[in-house]
Image (tube, helix red, strand yellow):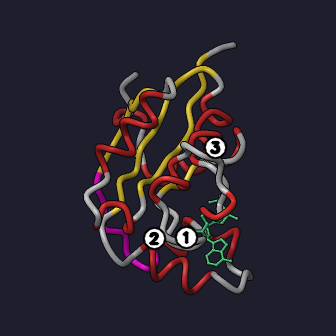
């Protein structure tokens, strides 16, 4: 299979606990390569734009306030089957249901403060990468 790219974020609950390196290592150990990375403290407006697909969900305000509450690491990951592989190493949204050894099982605090984001499909990966990075910032 050809190399694929996906979009990943290390969320504020994790940067607050100084877990950027530990989480990045778990991604790398799964065979994913960081080909773009930036630390951002996103505005509420950025978070609302990024998560617009969830705007009618009951947790939208909580989610966007959390995501703008501290620094986030935005990343592009590259690897074979990168989208599915990243979702696998992240684990289920709710850490209580996440498989052993996954990032969310090991590090997440709750269903909201769940340490990482990963695109769920090729279309969303392309859209989310474009939201945060220009082509020249991605170096494979
Ligand atoms: P995932 O991040 O696993 O793809 P979703 O796309 O369903 O999950 O949700 C996006 C994010 O919204 C989650 O990662 C989590 O931070 C937050 N979220 C989802 N469900 C809830 C909930 N019931 N309460 C609070 N936050 C939630």
Q: Nearer the viewer, mark 3 or mark 1?
A: 3
Q: Dot 1: within a 10 Å radius of its alpha carbon, few (fewer than 14), some, or many (20 or more) residues?
A: some
Q: Secondary structure at mark 3?
A: helix
Q: Residue at 70% x, 38% y: name it.
A: 122
> Looking at the picture, does residue 31 appear above or below residue 130?
above
Instruction: Locate residue 97, reporting x and y percent.
Output: 69, 60
Alpha carbon separation for disc pair 3 and 1: 22 Å
Judging by the rendered image, the residue that carries numbered circle 3 is 87
Q: Earlier in the sequence, mark 3 or mark 1?
A: 1
> Looking at the picture, does residue 49 appear above or below residue 132?
below
Q: Is residue 98 left or right of residue 112?
A: right
Which mark is drawn over residue 46? 2
Alpha carbon separation for disc pair 2 and 3: 23 Å
Point out the image quarter for the C terminus: top left
Say whether residue 90 is magenta. no
Q: Secondary structure at mark 1?
A: helix
> Does any atom of ligand 1 lie closer than 8 Å to the CB of label 3?
yes
Q: Nearer the viewer, residue 135 or 40?
A: 40
Q: Which residues are magenta?
A: 39-46
Which mark is drawn over residue 22? none
> Looking at the picture, does residue 2 appear above or below residue 124?
above
Instruction: Locate residue 85, reporting x and y percent.
Output: 62, 33
Judging by the rendered image, the residue that carries numbered circle 1 is 49
Q: Are marks 1 and 2 in contact (CB under 8 Å)?
A: yes
In terms of image quarters, where does ligand 1 lie? bottom right
Alpha carbon separation for disc pair 1 and 2: 5 Å
């Amino acid at each position: 299979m050809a190399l694929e790219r996906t979009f990943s974020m290390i969320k504020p609950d994790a940067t607050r606990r100084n877990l950027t390196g530990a989480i990045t290592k778990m991604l790398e150990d799964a065979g994913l390569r960081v080909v773009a990375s930036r630390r951002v403290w996103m505005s509420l407006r950025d978070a609302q734009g990024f998560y617009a697909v969830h705007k009618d969900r009951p947790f939208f305000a909580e989610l966007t306030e959390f995501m703008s509450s501290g620094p986030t690491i935005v990343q592009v990951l590259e690897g074979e089957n990168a989208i599915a592989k990243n979702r696998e190493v992240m684990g289920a949204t709710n850490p209580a249901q996440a498989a052993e050894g996954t990032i969310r099982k090991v590090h997440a605090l709750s269903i909201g403060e769940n340490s990482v984001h990963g695109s769920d499909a090729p279309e969303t990966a392309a859209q989310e990468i474009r939201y945060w990075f220009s082509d020249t910032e991605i170096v494979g």
